[in-house]
Image (spheres, rainbow, N blue to C red):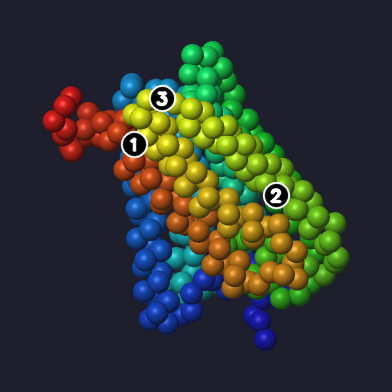
């Protein structure tokens, strides 16, 4: 019988790994990924802030992506690690709401930001002469503020509803963080209307931006094939493939998880997929953008004085 029942306002997170040596080893790997993500994204933010050559819309958007990834992974991994190490699985009612709010805010905002980055690359490659006008600093700031504002508003609505649902069954959430869909089976009321709203919200904040990104890059690839310069074509392909790699790692497991009906989902599968978009993607983003971007590597040389190149 579960320790946590309707007489307590707290929840309990069943976690990702079992309490055994294998689980401890896997947790160590997760903590290593967390540290790499923190270091990588912090470095990207510092480079873009310090190097004036990176003060362009593309890199300003990238700095916001790194900031979101920092907050994204910080909203789940520390609590998961603390619960495993301490042997406690409890999370307070308020703590569950705060974690859910920040997770959903970052998820929605990052989806919109990735769409903004796709538009930036579309204008830069397909309309290079109009880029300073169509992708101005003011528009870039509006995209960033819009992503944060819309993500926060959507997250607040979902979190407020989830915290007002009457929970009259076991309060054991079969996940490693307070994910709203994982909390719905614990409710003692019919939640099909809200589940439909989750579907609509996912479509608006993830599926539609993904379709916009696909359309943008379809147009970009068409323009690339028409380029006469092999160097320009290679550079465009490199930029596009970098962004598409990030988009695929982020959107694919997220959309697959949240657009499926409850009867086709399993807690084990949801937790495994969540590892991709909550833990692995925040670590991969700075690696992908730095290792495949000469401008970022140049900024590393100028700011930190390492990886010196022969040609300056």
Task: Name the residue at 47% across, 47% down.
Answer: 245
For residue 115, the mark is: none
Closer to the camera in the image, 274 or 241: 241
Badge 2 marks a residue whose secondary structure is helix
- Residue 289 position in % (x across, y down): 38, 40
Q: Which label's residue is closer to the chain start, 2 or 1?
A: 2
Disc 1 designates what residue?
293
Characterize the local packing of mark 2: few (<14), some (14-19) or many (20 or more) Cα atoms within 10 angstroms: some
Residue 99 appears anywhere in the view: no
- Name the residue at 41% across, 69% down: 27
Q: Mark 3 points at which residue?
A: 228
Q: Quadrant of the N terminus?
A: bottom right
Residue that lies at the very extreme toward the bottom in this rendered image = 1
Q: Of the two numbered discs 3 and 1 on the same chain, state the one appearing first in sequence.
A: 3
- Badge 2 is on which residue? 202
Q: Compared with residue 18, is residue 260 higher up or lower down, i.e. above or below?
A: above
């Amino acid at each position: 019988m579960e320790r946590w029942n309707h007489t307590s306002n707290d929840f309990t997170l069943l976690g990702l790994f079992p309490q055994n040596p294998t689980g401890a080893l896997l947790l160590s790997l997760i903590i290593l990924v967390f540290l790499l993500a923190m270091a990588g994204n912090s470095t990207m933010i510092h480079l873009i802030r310090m190097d004036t050559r990176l003060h362009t819309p593309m890199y300003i958007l990238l700095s916001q992506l790194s900031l979101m990834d920092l907050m994204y992974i910080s909203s789940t991994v520390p609590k998961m690690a603390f619960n495993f190490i301490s042997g406690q699985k409890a999370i307070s009612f308020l703590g569950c709401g705060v974690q859910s709010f920040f997770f959903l805010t970052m998820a929605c905002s990052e989806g919109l930001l990735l769409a903004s980055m796709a538009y930036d690359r579309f204008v830069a490659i397909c309309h290079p002469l109009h880029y300073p006008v169509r992708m101005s600093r003011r528009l870039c700031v509006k995209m960033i503020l819009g992503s944060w504002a819309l993500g926060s508003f959507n997250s607040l609505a979902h979190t407020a509803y989830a915290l007002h649902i009457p929970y009259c069954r076991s309060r054991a959430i079969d996940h490693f963080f307070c994910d709203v869909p994982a909390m719905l089976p614990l409710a003692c009321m019919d939640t099909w209307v809200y589940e439909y709203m989750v579907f609509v919200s996912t479509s608006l904040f993830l599926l539609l931006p993904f379709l916009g990104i696909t359309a943008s890059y379809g147009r970009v690839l068409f323009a690339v094939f028409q380029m006469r310069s092999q160097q320009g074509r290679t550079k465009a392909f490199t930029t596009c493939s970098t962004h598409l790699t990030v988009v695929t790692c982020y959107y694919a497991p997220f959309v697959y998880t949240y657009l499926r009906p409850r009867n086709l989902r399993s807690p084990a599968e949801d937790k495994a997929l969540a590892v991709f978009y909550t833990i692995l993607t925040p670590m991969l983003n700075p690696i992908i953008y730095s290792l495949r971007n000469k401008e970022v590597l140049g900024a590393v040389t100028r700011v930190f004085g390492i990886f010196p190149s022969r040609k300056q």
